[in-house]
Amino acid sequence: MSTKQIIGVFDDESVLLKATQKLKENGVNIKGIFGPSADHDLIKKLTKESRLPYLSVATGVITIILTFAFVYYVSVIDYPLHYGGKPVFSFPPMVVILFLVCILITGAFTTFSFLTSEKMFPGKSAKVVHPRSLDDRFYLVLERNFNPEEIIQWLQDSGVEKIIEEENEA
Amino acid sequence: MINNKIRYALVKGDKTYGQITDELLLNVEQKPPLWWFAGMTIGTILLAIGGWAFYMSLSQGLGTWGLTNSVAWGWDIINFVWWIGIGHAGTAFTIFFLVFRQKWAGSINRSAEAMTVFAVMCAGLFPLIHMGRPWLAFFILPYPNTRLLWLNFNSPLFWDVLAISTYLITSIMLWYMGMVPDLATIAQRTKNKVGKFLYGMFSLGWNGSLYTYSRYETLMKILGGLAAPLVISVHTIVALDFAVSVLPGWHATILPPYFFVGAIFSGFAMVLTLMILFRKAFNLYDYITEKHLDNIAHVLKFGSLIIGLAYVTELFTAWYSGVDYEIYTFFRARATGSFSVAFWIMFVFNAVIPQLFWFNKARKNLIILFLISIVINIGMWFERYIILVSSLAEDFLPSSWTHYSPTMVDIGIYLGTFGLFTCGMLMFVRYIPIVAVNEVKPIARAEKLRKQKAQDHEH
């Protein structure tokens, strides 16, 4: 297996995008792209679409069903009190409650799922390629098991700023 | 024609990413200026006054407040509604940015969100203290208990609890998740060991991977989308606290939209106040440009028109209903009677003065912008005063009519919330980048590309 990795340093997203697309076409394994911010364009072209929205919709639906069951149980079955002649079960106030609980639980659960899927938690030590990757440069980390000379040639053609070859610590 | 390229600059100057990081982290990395300490001192004094008032309310009971049998909601609920209104703008900005893709909101939403979080905290304090025994506040949550009681889910007061806690939690999530990449950047740069540890801890191991960004972008869009209806619902529900009662002046279907617009209006005014201060204090002229202030002024002008319409509509419906009580409340008590001064302050400050924003000169003049933003918040306070006190103090039974005035304890709690807000905002500007660094970078780049394109086109 590879013991080294090649890192291309870029200072512009469009150059990075072109280089990455070319390397991908040629079957080079991209281990990671790190940068200080992410253009919507870059995200759209280089990554798979996240499935988080499906999860939130599912959470929302389940929350609504459970909340409805709970409110119905409380106000109709367990504690049917009459307040000033109003019906024990009425739908309009339910709308408010279902709506708010749905937003609260869905928001919290989606955030929690994001953190879980990214294995992020408070106190985790960040594996940052280079401090500048969170400041002003983009780092394209490549596996070296392809043909290194060819990779370096491609990177240079694309207009890379700098190429770093280093031992793979992982 | 005005030169569009200059007029519409959202980030001024051709800045590199490195420059943006340096300039926007300045407030975190430099030593706090003298006024910061002065502000903190004033904030702490106000907090201490609030603490005293809080202690008085708890130890001696709510008899220390100016409430009477007739005016059972007074200063506390006025200020509660006022703070909630201010707290509305933050999420509105985030939604403009994330959901409607309004790029100009990108450099404002962080501080607007901070304002929201602290304003909602201040607001939440009032009903909590008004309970009289805040340590039993958990009684309002639906949980199986030994008293074998459940809640009345039909009560707007319960919806309020739910609405405000949902709003606070969702706003905090939006705010915090939005700043995680920036916290990671600070953690990499800071030399201070404690700072490195704390920023590192709160950055949750963020390493700037594009794959994380991909999910993160989706997450932020989902949170923004979820928060969007919340902005409308929170103040609507606050309005329902009033609208479902039968008092003249409260019992009206116009109240929910009227409260909502009022909230957006006062929130944006507060954002304008803060933005003018922040850009001066931290030299953010290149990021919070005239264009941003101009946009906020336009929103305020629009809000003011709707508010004015709501005031006139209220008067019209009171007259058109033919109900004596409604006519009395609106035309006698409010417009010409014992509350007329407050009524006309409200009317002029909210519906008339912001109309100055029709003039380009007024929108470009920082002093006028600043003064009007403050005038609006004073006007909005009077609006809540009018709605609450005029309806309660002079209701159906003239024998129960009273006069309402706050006591020192009432005022103390209000000052205390100002202390909380001031200290909160000052801590924010000290430890967190005021402008979202990772969100401004793509905006700056887009701006640069557009400029290049325009230049190529010219040649």
Image (spheres, coloured by chain):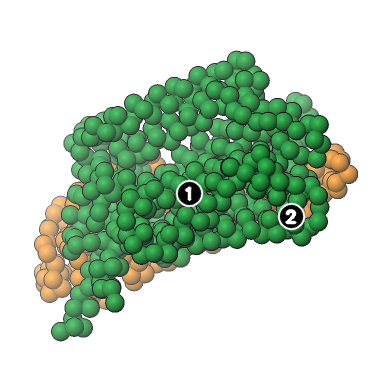
- On the image, the x and y values in percent for residue A91 come to 77, 54
- On the image, the x and y values in percent for residue B276 come to 33, 49
Height in image: B267 above or below A50? above
Say which amino acid is labelled 2. Answer: Ala
Q: Chain A is shown in which shade?
A: orange
Q: Quadrant of the C terminus of chain B?
A: bottom left
Residue assigned mark 1: B376
- Residue B206 or B282: which is nearer the viewer? B282
| Residue B382 shown left or right of residue B288 in the figure | right
Q: Alpha-carbon neighbours of circle 1 within 10 Å: few (<14), some, or many (≥20)?
A: many
Which residue is depicted at the point 86% across and 48% down?
A87
- On the image, the x and y values in percent for residue B447 come to 26, 68
- On the image, the x and y values in percent for residue B242 come to 70, 45
Q: Which chain is green?
A: B
Q: Alpha-carbon neighbours of circle 2 within 10 Å: few (<14), some, or many (≥20)?
A: many
- Residue B70 or A138: which is nearer the viewer? B70
Instruction: Check residue B318 in the rendering and tell me which mark sits there, or answer none.
Output: 2
Instruction: Check residue B135 in the rendering and tell me which mark sits there, or answer none.
Output: none
Question: Which chain is mark 2 on?
Answer: B
Say which amino acid is labelled 1. Answer: Ile
- Residue B132 or A170: which is nearer the viewer? B132
Same subunit, tags 2 and 1: yes
- Residue A31 or B148: which is nearer the viewer? B148
Question: Which chain is mark 1 on?
Answer: B
